[in-house]
């Protein structure tokens, strides 16, 4: 499923979405969100919104292939990163909220994959990809929060999470901004180890840390666990219906200003 250009990424995501609808698989939730992110990047490249369109496409494809490779490995029962395994394993559990499944995908893709893709596209100079890195994160942030607002249609009691705003919970405190900053620091440190024997070990160590975060996102405790159960009771139950709802929403375009704009939460 390796893509060589952004249109192939779009095709691969559409295939995952269609397969997930046909098989009633919750793996389609993240694919539907990621489709919208990738479509926005493609539109931005076509409109000349990025400093270097060809480089942005290369960055996007390298980034997306991390997810596509993980999905293929999971489907074929092959080895994959612990953070992606944790995300895909939760798709097999009917008790997890749609929001939890989206956050688990973002946890693996931003906290681990984004930094690796940035190093791979950098050519040894992180300064050269910083604007592209920020632009991708601006799009992810804007579209993710928009989709999270939209999933109240499928999860009408999701606002109950606001009752825990003062509760120390990874689920509540997950921040795309923090993930972005952590990914950039990881990329800077990883670049120093490129072309050395320590490169793979550094990625594995990072993956173990992100996998631990995934466990916190997937498994709530105490009163938070009760709140999630109540939210789940009233959430739509059929994955195919939810995927269609999320994917239909992708048709609504959003304009992202990527020019001289720092990403915000």
Image (spheres, helix red, strand yellow):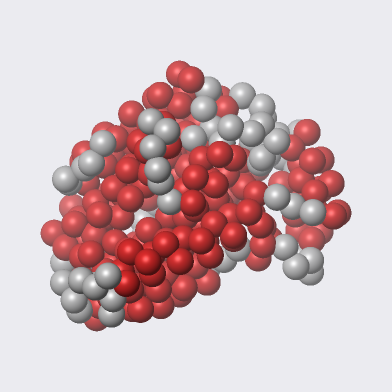
Q: Where's the N terminus, which quadrant? A: top left
Q: Position of residue 246 (x, y in %)?
A: 50, 36
Position of residue 118 relative to residue 159, above or below, is: below
Instruction: Tell me which residue sits at (59%, 60%) in the image.
Output: 213
Position of residue 92 relative to residue 218, above or below, is: above
User: Relative to the observer, which residue lies in front, 265 or 188?
Assistant: 188
The mark tally for this picture is 0
**Hey, which residue is sitting farthest top in the picture?**
22
**Hey, which residue is sitting farthest left in the picture?**
54
**Left or right, residue 42 beside residue 27:** left
Q: Quadrant of residue 121?
A: bottom left
Res. 5 visible in picture: yes
User: Relative to the observer, which residue lies in front, 43 or 21?
Assistant: 21
**Hey, which residue is sitting farthest front in the picture?**
197
**Left or right, residue 110 beside residue 161:** left
Instruction: Tell me which residue sits at (16%, 66%) in the image.
Output: 52
**Left or right, residue 104 beside residue 197:** right
User: Relative to the observer, which residue lies in front, 20 or 66?
Assistant: 66
Q: Quadrant of residue 22?
A: top left
**Left or right, residue 60 beside residue 159:** left
Instruction: Tell me which residue sits at (41%, 46%) in the image.
Output: 80
Q: Position of residue 114 (x, y in %)?
A: 36, 62
Q: Position of residue 142 (x, y in %)?
A: 46, 59
Instruction: Tell me which residue sits at (57%, 44%) in the image.
Output: 101
Q: Position of residue 164 (x, y in %)?
A: 79, 61
Position of residue 248 relative to residue 85, above or below, is: above
Res. 144 visible in picture: no
């Amino acid at each position: 499923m390796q893509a060589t250009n952004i249109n192939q990424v779009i095709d691969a995501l559409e295939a995952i979405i269609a397969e997930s609808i046909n098989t009633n698989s919750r793996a389609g939730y993240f694919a539907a969100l990621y489709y919208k992110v990738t479509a926005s990047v493609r539109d931005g490249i076509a409109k000349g919104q990025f400093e270097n369109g060809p480089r942005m496409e290369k960055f996007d494809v390298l980034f997306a292939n991390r997810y596509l490779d993980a999905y293929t490995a999971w489907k074929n029962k092959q080895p994959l990163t612990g953070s992606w395994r944790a995300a895909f394993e939760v798709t097999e559990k009917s008790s997890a909220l749609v929001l939890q499944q989206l956050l688990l995908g973002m946890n693996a893709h931003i906290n681990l994959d984004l930094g690796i893709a940035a190093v791979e596209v950098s050519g040894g100079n992180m300064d050269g990809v910083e604007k592209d890195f920020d632009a991708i994160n601006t799009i992810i942030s804007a579209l993710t929060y928009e989709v999270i607002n939209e999933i109240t249609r499928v999860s009408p009691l999701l606002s109950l999470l606001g009752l825990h705003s003062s509760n120390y919970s990874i689920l509540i405190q997950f921040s795309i901004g923090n993930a972005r900053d952590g990914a950039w620091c990881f990329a800077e440190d990883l670049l120093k180890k490129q072309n050395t024997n320590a490169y793979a070990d550094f990625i594995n160590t990072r993956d173990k840390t992100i996998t631990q975060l995934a466990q916190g996102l997937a498994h709530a405790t105490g009163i938070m666990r009760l709140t999630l159960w109540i939210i789940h009771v009233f959430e739509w139950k059929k994955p195919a219906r939810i995927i269609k709802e999320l994917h239909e929403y992708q048709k609504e375009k959003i304009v992202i200003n990527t020019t001289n704009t720092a990403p915000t939460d």
